[in-house]
C-alpha cells in the first residue's frame, strides 16, 4: 500500500464541451473545506460547464444554519433579479448527473418559483408529518440538501432568517413550506418524483446506474426518472461513492476510466537523485516466511534512489534476525536512514509496529510517501515504487484475487452492519474489466 501524507488531490473533469452552459443559471454551494467529496462535486459541475460560486471557504464550520446565513448574504446582490435561476446545493455528498439545459427545462416544467428536493421521511421533526400536504405519488417531505429557484424568490425565502449557525436549516425551510401563506408567497413546491433531485438516503434501493453513450446517470426506478442531482448524505454516502465512480463521466464502457490518468506526476524529468520525493518504506515480518533473503534482494534492486528512502523494518521472528542483519550489514549505509525493530523489542501487538512506521513519515516534514509492504509480498517489477508515485494518488492499494475464484481482498460494497456485500460491479472489478 502506498499512502501520500502531504498534499491533497485535485482532479479536473474533462469538459464535455460548451454546448450545455447557461448564462442565467448560477450554482451556489457551501464548502468550508476542500474535501475529496467537494472535489468530486466540482469535477461533475465542470463536466457540464456549470457556473459555480463557493460560499464559506476559509470559514470555520459551525452547523447547518451557517448555510442559510451564507446564502442570505450571497443573495443580497440578486434581490431584484427575476431572470437569474439559482441552484443551491450541498457539495460534499453531491454529484451532478446532467447539465444546465436539462436542469432549467425541468425547473420550468415544475411551474413554481422555488423547487425543493423531497425526502421519504420528515426530518428533523417527524411530528410535523401530518401538516404536510397530501401527495398522490412520490416523496412527501421537504429536503434542504438542494433546491432551485429564481434569485428574487430565494431572496424572499431566506429574508426572515436570523437563526444561529448551529440551528437546523431544514427545519427553517420546513416551517416556511408548511405555512400555506408563505408557501404561496414564495411559491414553493417539492420535487416529489425526483425529476431533478435524488436524495438517496432512505431510498437506496430506488436507484440504478444507467449507462448512456459516453456518459452515466442514475435512474430512479420507482418514478422512472433521471435526476439531475444526486445527494447521498448520511449512511447513503457509501452508495453515492459507488455511483460517483461512474456518474457523470468517471468510468464508461466506451472510455474506461476517464479520470485515472489525470494529474500524473512524472519522475522522469528529475535531473538528480536528490530531487526524488522522500519515501519511508515500512517492512513487516510478522511470522516465519520463506524466501526472506530474496525479498531483501528485490528491495535493494528497486529502481529508486536509496538516498531518498528511509527504511523501517519491524521483525517479530527470531528466526529471521540473521536475514535482516545480513541485508543491513551490506546495504544500510546506502539508505537515507534505517530503523530496525527486532523481536527483542517486540511490541505487544503488531498493529502498533505498523502505526509506528507511518509515524516516522508523519513526523518528518520531508517525507512525502509511505510505502507499506509485508515480507511475503513479491515485487516483480523493480520500477514499482516509481510507477506508484507517478499515479499521483493519495492512497493506492493492491487488489489481490485468487485465480479462477471469486475471492479477493476487495469488497465492492458494505452491508449496513459493516460486513461484505456484493456490489453490482464486483465481478467486473475483480476480473479487471473496469479499469
Ligand atoms: C499531483 O497531485 C497534486 C495534488 O492533487 C496536484 O496539485 C498536482 O498538480 C499533481 N501533479 C501533476 C503533475 O499534475
Ligand atoms: C405558484 O405559482 C403558480 C402560478 O405562477 C401557481 O399556479 C401555483 O399554484 C403556485 N404554487 C404555490 C405553491 O403557491
Ligand atoms: C515494469 O512496469 C513498468 C510500468 O508499468 C513497465 O513499463 C515495465 O515494462 C515493467 N517492467 C517489467 C520488467 O515488467
Image (cartoon, rainbow, N blue to C red):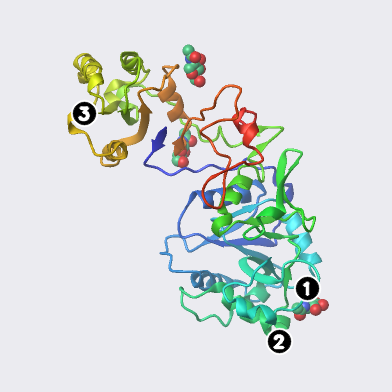
Asked if ligand 3 lies within 8 A of label 3, the reply is: no
Quick check: marks 3 and 1 in contact, CB under 8 Å?
no
For this orientation, the residue located farthest to the bottom is: 181
Label 2 vs 3, first from the N-terminus: 2
Q: Which residue occupies 22% across, 20% down?
A: 321
Label 3 vs 1, first from the N-terminus: 1
**Image coords of residue 77 (percent x, y):** 58, 72
Residue behind mark 1? 135
10 Å crowding of disc 1: few (<14), some (14-19), many (20+):
few
Badge 1 element: loop
Gap in angstroms between the C-alphas marked 2 and 3: 75 Å
Badge 3 element: helix
Q: Which residue occupies 70% across, 52% down?
A: 207
**Could you tell whether 46 is left or right of 61 in the image?**
right
Query: Is the residue 76 above or below the residue 424 in the image?
Result: below
Q: Is residue 21 among what the camera can see? A: no
Label 2 vs 1, first from the N-terminus: 1
Indicate which label's residue lies in the foreground, 2 or 3.
3
Residue behind mark 2? 181
Amino acid at each position: 500500500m502506498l499512502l501520500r501524507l502531504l498534499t491533497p488531490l485535485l482532479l479536473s473533469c474533462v469538459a464535455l464541451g460548451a454546448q450545455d452552459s447557461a448564462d442565467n443559471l448560477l450554482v451556489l454551494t457551501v464548502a468550508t473545506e476542500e474535501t475529496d467529496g467537494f472535489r468530486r462535486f466540482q469535477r461533475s459541475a465542470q463536466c457540464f460547464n456549470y457556473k459555480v460560486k463557493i460560499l464559506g471557504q476559509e470559514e470555520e464550520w459551525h452547523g447547518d444554519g451557517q448555510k442559510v446565513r451564507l446564502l442570505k448574504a450571497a443573495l443580497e446582490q440578486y434581490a431584484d433579479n427575476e431572470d437569474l435561476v439559482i441552484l443551491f446545493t450541498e457539495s460534499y455528498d453531491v454529484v451532478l448527473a446532467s447539465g444546465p439545459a436539462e436542469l432549467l427545462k425541468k425547473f420550468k416544467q415544475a411551474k413554481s418559483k422555488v423547487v425543493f428536493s423531497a425526502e421519504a421521511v420528515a426530518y428533523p421533526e417527524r411530528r410535523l408529518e401530518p401538516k404536510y400536504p397530501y401527495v398522490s405519488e412520490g416523496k412527501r417531505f421537504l429536503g434542504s440538501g438542494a433546491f432551485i429557484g429564481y434569485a428574487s424568490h430565494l431572496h424572499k425565502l431566506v429574508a426572515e432568517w436570523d437563526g444561529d449557525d448551529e440551528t437546523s436549516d431544514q427545519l427553517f425551510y420546513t416551517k416556511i413550506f408548511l405555512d400555506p401563506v408563505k408557501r404561496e408567497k414564495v411559491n414553493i413546491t417539492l420535487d416529489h418524483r425526483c425529476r431533478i433531485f435524488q436524495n438517496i438516503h432512505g431510498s437506496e434501493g430506488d436507484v440504478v446506474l444507467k449507462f448512456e453513450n459516453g456518459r452515466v446517470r442514475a435512474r430512479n426506478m420507482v418514478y422512472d426518472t433521471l435526476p439531475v442531482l444526486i445527494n447521498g448524505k448520511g449512511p447513503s454516502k457509501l452508495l453515492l461513492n459507488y455511483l460517483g465512480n461512474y456518474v457523470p463521466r468517471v468510468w464508461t464502457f466506451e472510455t474506461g476510466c476517464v479520470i485515472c490518468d489525470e494529474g500524473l506526476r512524472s519522475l522522469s524529468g528529475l535531473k538528480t537523485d536528490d530531487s526524488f520525493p522522500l519515501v519511508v518504506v515500512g517492512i513487516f515480518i510478522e511470522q516465519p516466511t520463506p524466501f526472506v533473503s530474496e525479498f531483501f534482494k528485490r528491495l535493494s534492486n528497486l529502481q529508486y534512489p536509496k538516498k531518498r528512502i528511509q527504511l523501517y523494518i519491524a521483525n517479530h521472528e527470531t528466526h529471521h534476525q540473521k536475514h535482516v542483519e545480513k541485508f543491513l550489514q551490506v546495504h544500510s549505509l546506502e539508505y537515507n536512514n534505517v530503523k530496525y525493530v527486532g523481536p527483542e523489542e517486540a511490541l505487544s501487538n503488531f498493529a502498533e509496529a505498523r502505526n509506528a512506521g507511518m509515524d516516522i513519515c508523519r513526523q518528518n516534514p520531508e517525507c512525502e510517501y509511505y510505502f507499506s509492504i509485508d515480507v511475503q509480498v513479491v515485487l516483480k517489477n523493480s520500477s514499482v515504487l516509481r510507477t506508484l508515485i507517478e499515479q499521483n494518488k493519495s492512497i493506492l492499494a493492491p487488489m489481490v484475487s485468487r485465480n479462477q475464484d471469486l475471492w479477493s481482498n476487495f469488497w465492492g460494497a458494505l452491508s449496513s452492519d459493516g460486513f461484505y456485500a456484493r456490489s453490482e460491479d464486483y465481478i467486473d472489478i475483480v476480473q479487471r474489466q473496469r479499469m
